[in-house]
Structure formats: C-alpha cells, structure tokens
Amino acid sequence: MESHRSSTTNAVGLCLLPSELIQYIFLRLSLPDVFQFKSVSKSIAFLISDQDFVRDYNLQSSSATWLFVYKKRWHRDAVLQGFTDCSNRWFKVPIADTLKQMIPRGEDLYFLAASGDHFLFALNTSQEVISVNPVLRTVKRIPPSPLGPRGTSSWRRSGMKLLSRPPEVGHFRFLFAEMNGNFPVLFEYSSKTDKWHSTVARENFDVLRRCNRRERDHTFLSIFNGRNESVLIAAGSQGETPVVVRPRFHGGGNEEGQSAVGFGWGNAINRLQFYGDGNMVISRSEGVDVAKSNTKLLVSLELWSLSSDGRCWEFISNVPSELIDQIKKPYGVIMGCLEEKKGTVRVLLMSNFEGVWDIIWLCFSVGGRQWTWVPLPDCKMKGSNLAGITFSSGLSLS
C-alpha cells in the first residue's frame, strides 16, 4: 500500500511539471516505459498521443539501438525480450498472443531478424517465414521464396538483412543472398508488393573503388566465408544490380584445423570468425584446464573490414586487453554476430558454460577508433534455449 501511495504521489508530481519538460523527459524514455505512463493521467495520455510528440519520438527511436533475444523452454511459452543501451533493464515484448492467431501449438519458431516495428520468424515445421508487428499486434505469412520452403537451419545470419522504411510508411525489404546454379543471387521480398524478386549479381569490376564503401548505400550479405577468401553480395537500392565482392584474407595465422565460421565448440575450436555488414570479427581462445578440454577462455578479439575496393579484408583494431579481462568468462560453446550502423560497429558474443548463457555487447566507434562495453543485466537465460538474437532500431509510437 505504501508503494502504491508513493507511485501515485510521483505521478501527481510529474503532472505538475510544465508540459515542455514532461515532453523532454518522455522523449528519452524507452517505448515500454512510455506506454506505462499512458495510464497515469488523461493529460499525459493526451501528450503522448499528440502527433508532434509521436513524430519527434519516432524520429529519435529510429536512431536508437536495441538488442532482442528470443528464448524458449521445453513445454513452455517462448519469450521475446529487448534491451536498449539507453536503459538498464530488459523489457518483455508481448508477441505470444499475436502469434497464437496464426501459429499452431507446438510449431518450432526461430527469430531471424528485426528492424523498427517488423520482426521476422522462421517456422521449422511448415518451413515458412512470418512477419510480426508487436506495436499493431499483427502477423502475416510471407510467400515462399523462389528457392522454395526453407527450414530454420537454412537461414544464415550474415547472409540476410531486414530493412524497414520510415515508420509512417510501414513497409520493409527482406534480403538474403545464396548461390543458385553456380551464380551469386540476391533474393528480395518487398512487403509493399508482397512479392519476391531475384537478381543475379555481377562481378565487382572496380565498382566499389569509385567511393569509400562506408559512404555508399550498400548492404553487404555473406554467401561464403572460408579460411582465406569470402564471397559477398553488395546490394544497393531497389532496382540497382547487386555486385559480387570476393575479399581475400591474408591474416590466417597458423591455427590449421582449429577455426570455424559463426559457431564454435570449446573442445575443438580456438578461432571463430563471424561476419556482418562488410565486417569480420575474429575471436581467439585458449584452453582453461587440460583436464577440461571442452572449456575455453576468450583471449582476444580482432575487427577486420572490407577494403575500399572490396578486394581484401583489412585489419582495423584489437579489443584492448584490459577490456578483454573484464568480459572473458569460461565457455563450452560460443557464437557471435555484428552490425555496422552510422559509424559504429556493434559486436555480440553469446557463450554457454554448463547450461548458463552469457551475452557480451561491444561497440567500436569507427571515427574515434575506440571500444566500449555495454554491460547487460541478467537475461535469466538459465534453462532456456536461445532461439534467435539480433540488433535492431527502436519500435515506433503509433
């Protein structure tokens, strides 16, 4: 009762502030917090519903960075949680009731990607893809791709991208790259037309050399990543022919037979490479205890990036050793993903040790050439299966 009185008093006190100050405060809140304040008073609800406030909030939200994690337990409902770097806690994203509209009980879902208000899930049993809008609480089946039905294991994180249009438009593009008939092909779905379009990519005959790749409006999708060479597709705007990029890697080291791409088991892997948005991160580990050969410890992280002409991978930076000392923990399984957005490369490492998941979020400022660590509160992953994780922009206020 005392807690209730305290929250009521705080709400009344907030209402007494000038509307300009209230708006300034609310523009810096995450969307779940804004929704909670709608029930405080009619005046606050009116302010939040004002079209000028909605426009300003959505503009700011579109530049925010969120981390979404989809976890599930055996015979229990799955949970989608989100965390933003301007908050200090995880938020539960309500999608369970929305999914029940279309998804049969027992269907195995995997979280593919998110951008703005749009979330994509792959259905393993029916081999379909659905889009979910948690703000509007809608769900829609996406037509089968030109390659036909695909199970959850067919989707490679670094080979796909979800691109949302401005929130007021409400549409998105879903891109993924594959080899098809020995040709690199870009497959693109448009929610506006509800159709797929496929384009064979052309070779990079100095296309990227004409401009620094970071200044071009290209989306880089991985098709193949080997020890010394990669194959990517650089996708431009709609209607623009995609380009094949074949960067060579000359920093392979001497860990023959001890490297992997995308996912590593502790008992076999010392080096892990993962990719995203024309960047590559190499994590290097070492054994913790000879008696426990399946347990490793992270010792270094390297960031590499495509050269301006796309011909090779260029070394960019090491994560400082003092930062490695803060984040390293024993693991049995490790995986990673990364994205680049507005001059910042975001790196995500997910490791599991004896059933306990640990998530590490690092940021590298390209201009300032500085690494920072975004500490995450406990996501309560113990006993849960990780069924998808991705970075995204913020949800919009409708």
Image (cartoon, rainbow, N blue to C red):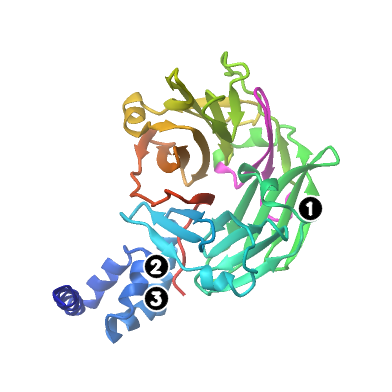
Residue picked out by circle 3: 52
In the depicted view, which residue is nearer to us: 43 or 104? 104
Q: How far apart are the two marked residues, 3 and 2, measured between alpha carbons?
A: 9 Å
Total numbered labels: 3
Q: How far apart are the two marked residues, 3 and 1, measured between alpha carbons?
A: 40 Å
Q: How far apart are the two marked residues, 2 and 1, measured between alpha carbons?
A: 36 Å
Residue 383 lies, with reference to residue 60, above or below; the image says above
The residue at 26%/67% (across/down) is 25
- Lower position in the chain sequence, tag 3 or tag 2: 3
**What residue type is disc 3 on?**
Asp
237 within the magenta span: yes
**What residue type is disc 2 on?**
Tyr
Residue 41 rendering spot, x and y as whole percentages: 27, 83
Residue 384 rendering spot, x and y as whole percentages: 48, 51
Instruction: Give the crowd class for mark 2: few <14, some 14-19, many >=20 residues within 10 Å.
Output: many
Part of the protein shown in magenta: 215-240
Report whether residue 292 is seen. Answer: yes
Residue 161 rendering spot, x and y as whole percentages: 62, 51
Helix, strand or loop at label 3? It is: helix
The residue at 38%/67% (across/down) is 32
Q: Are marks 3 and 2 in contact (CB under 8 Å)?
A: no
Which residue lies most toward the top here?
Answer: 254
Mark toward the viewer: 3 or 1:
1
Mark toward the viewer: 3 or 2:
2
**What residue type is disc 1 on?**
Ser
Helix, strand or loop at label 1? It is: strand
Is 3 displayed left or right of 131 in the figure?
A: left
Residue picked out by circle 2: 57
Residue picked out by circle 1: 198
Residue 284 lies, with reference to residue 187, above or below; the image says above
Q: Quadrant of the N terminus?
A: bottom left
The residue at 44%/43% (across/down) is 357
